[in-house]
Amino acid sequence: MFKPHAVALCALFAALAAPAHATDVALATSSAQAGYGAWQTFNVSDIDSRSFGVEWIDNANSNAPGFGTVLGFTLTIETGSTGTLTVVDTGFAGDTFKLTNFGSIFGGTSGVPTALYDGNAPSVGDFDTALADASFSHGSFVFGAGTYRISGMLDQSVMLDAATPLYSTSGGLRLTVAAVPEPSSAAMLAAGLGVIGMLARLRRRRGWPPSPSADTPQEPHMKLRPLVASLAIGMLCLGAAHAQTRPPIVVKVIGFNDYHGNLQSPGTFGVNTTVPSAQRPPVGGAEYLAAYVARMKAQNPLNVVVGGGDFVGAAPLISALFFDEPAVETLNKIGVEFSSVGNHEFDKGSAELRRLQNGGCKIVNGSPDPNSCIGLGSGAPGTFDGAKFKWLSANVIEASTGRTLLPAYGMKSFGGVKVAFIGMTLKDTPKIVTPTGVAGLEFRDEADTVNALVPKLRAQGVEAIVVLVHQGGFQTSPNVGDINGCDGNLKNTDGSDSDIGAIVKRLDNAVDLVISAHTHSAYNCSANTVDVKSVNGTVTSTPRPTGLANKNGRLIPVTSASAFGRVLTDIDLSIDPVSRDVTQVAVTNRLVDRTDAAITAAIAADPTVKNIVAGYNALVSPLANTVIGSITSALPNTGNSAGEMPAGDLIADAQLQATQPVALGGAVAAFMNPGGVRSPGFTATSYPHDVTYGEAFTAQPFGNSLVTMTLTAQQIRNVLEQQFVGCLGQTTQRILQISNGLKYSWSAAAAPCAKITDLTLTPTNLGVVPPVVTAAPEVLVSAGVVLSPTRTYRVTVNNFLATGGDGFTVLKDGQSTLGGAQDIDALVSYLSGYKAPQAAYNQADPVFAVPRVTRLP
């Protein structure tokens, strides 16, 4: 970003760079004394050759690892005549003065430089002498009139004895043209090309090469500081000089997140909560996503489609039955190019994630599963091509190799400018995924990982950096949530309230945009943010420029696109073609509205994705449309103020019923984790409503198995206390859903581990319809005190909770565990008791003892 106080420095550079002789034909200069045609000197000095571990970039392999200390540089030149670039390396044997790119920006043609390796052990400061000496590497490249970007690096040798410090690794370049450019261009060019002349003169004042001695400075970061500062100022001046004549490169970034295999519409959705339910349009569906993306891409040929993770996992039956291959195939057709990895990508383990990335059929018991490789969206029937986009995760490391499980980042060039996309998985994934899903993996801090990548990306000439992170925030009351709002726990720009804010406030200033996910909330924390308020039925929408602050206090745009394909984030990145910096970010979240006539017509014209969805729907429909029971009212997965969900009550009852028989566990209570009760729960447009297998699977898609264990009264109390932040290591409030017969109260004001005030268990037989109380209530906790701490009870949870998932580590200590049915099978069995001709399930009936949880002040 060009700052006012830099103007004087730019003027100084321009004055220093003014041509000493108008008749001189050289283009580049290092200082006023040197004049045109002088050598440009790049030095890495006083660097210990044992400083290993820095990656460098090889022309033949952009991922080649190497050792040494790298100094990267980027220069821009402009000339109206044919020119010659001369390069020489004057350092120790094995050093590299490498040009990685010499490319035309506007007009002109150029050769392709190669690495130049110094072949002479001594270093010299006279480049003309070195150029005349065949033992020093050098080369010349001819280029035509035009504007060019040159980038390269000095790479310290590691071929010396490990105990020998390396001094004066250096290289020079000189550009000569047939005519001197007009003064303003020359001045700015000198600022860009000659920023390190002062460093060269300082070297000459103290002697070159220096002799290793006690008074020779040994701090490499102190030596590099003048160069970095000078180079930064020179590039600022150069970018400012050409800003008026070179329009910005505008890149359209299209983002969405938490698709979860929703090939079909997840229902209706409104732009904000003031829109009456009856006026909210149907949204989403893979074919509509594809058509909206195509419309956006047609607006700008410089575009990229990216994701925030959870593209698969926790999916409806139409995708999950086929191992989420339909989700990947439709995402391929939509045109996704990069996505971060979410926690749900690990539901079935890293090997399955790799299969989804690379392709191939799902092997079960040594043979391809018949539900795999259907191939409706792949190259041919009986195949699965895998994801054509790249899943990225910079902070997920294989413990056995120390390498990232998947690529850390991806790049795409637009008009000669590279944009990097860094993928991040939330570091708490092991807390919310079964241990088998993350076995052998390390999940590192998100912000630390991003910041460590910045120097590597800049060494490759990248200034525009976008982070795709699977973590987020929420828009909550009392403000009216809007898909382009930034309220709730995002409203404080210092990031003090939200998980995503806590990450952003530690990010390097190099990051330009954060596309977030995970919370299924739509928000737009950018210059396009709006405040939406409803007063006496009148809705107002007011722009409110904002963002979330990074570690420097600069406000960074942060976005999220709800979930299930309801919303697309439409982003225009404006990039300076000279500095390659992002200068502006314009963000708008847009509904994927299925009532848009033009979009519907586009789908009719190209029904490719629609046909894929229809094909899988035809295969899954016989099972998905099977009626398993009936309900008399909506049972959503949204919690009340105490955290109790109607859908959660139903599911907990189903799990208790499945394990009440003594032979199947002898359970008297069941706990269900709230995150496992998926949206929308059990809802319809009219009631009574016949619940289908497909709807039940949508609410319980994980395929978890039930586990019954023995817990003491004290342990049950500890489990309930562990629902709240600060108790026994819990970091996020998660209210468990409890089965019929349990009732308790919790105090919002009480301290951690002291919130449960009372707990009662009333034995209830759920194996009959309607349920029947079988014994008098038993008080386990009264006035915050456990009455019989060592008394034991049989309790059912799913295998995720049984292994300490969601931070419920107390459950890992359960005794006499017994495995049981899958959760979906338990749910189907329970609802069958409420299928015609039996009466429909009516949660308002007192026999279901709802509400079961009470929140106290």
Image (spheres, helix red, strand yellow):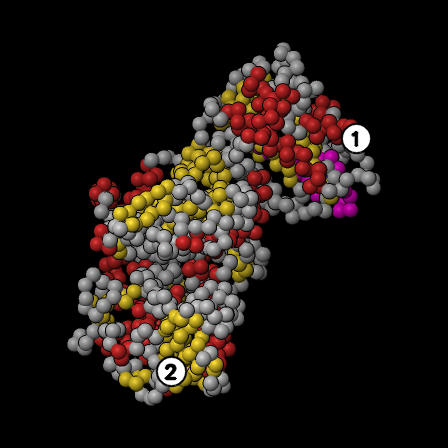
Q: Position of residue 51 (x, y in %)?
A: 70, 46
Distance from the alpha carbon under mark 2 to that under mark 1: 85 Å
Q: Quadrant of residue 657?
A: bottom left
Q: Earlier in the sequence, mark 2 or mark 1?
A: 1
Residue at mark 1: 206
Residue sitting at the far right: 214
310 and 377: which is toward the camera: 310
Q: Quadrant of residue 678?
A: bottom left
Residue at mark 2: 761
821 and 518: which is toward the camera: 518
Q: Total marks drawn?
A: 2
Q: Is residue 45 left or right of residue 579?
A: right
Q: Is residue 599 left or right of residue 553?
A: left
| Above-or-below relation of 195 to 176 | below
Q: Which residues are magenta?
A: 150-169
252 and 523: which is toward the camera: 523
Q: Position of residue 851 (x, y in %)?
A: 32, 73
Q: Position of residue 672 (x, y in %)?
A: 38, 72
Q: Which mark is residue 163?
A: none
Whether residue 85 can be seen here: no
Q: Position of residue 27 (x, y in %)?
A: 60, 19
Residue 158 among magenta residues = yes
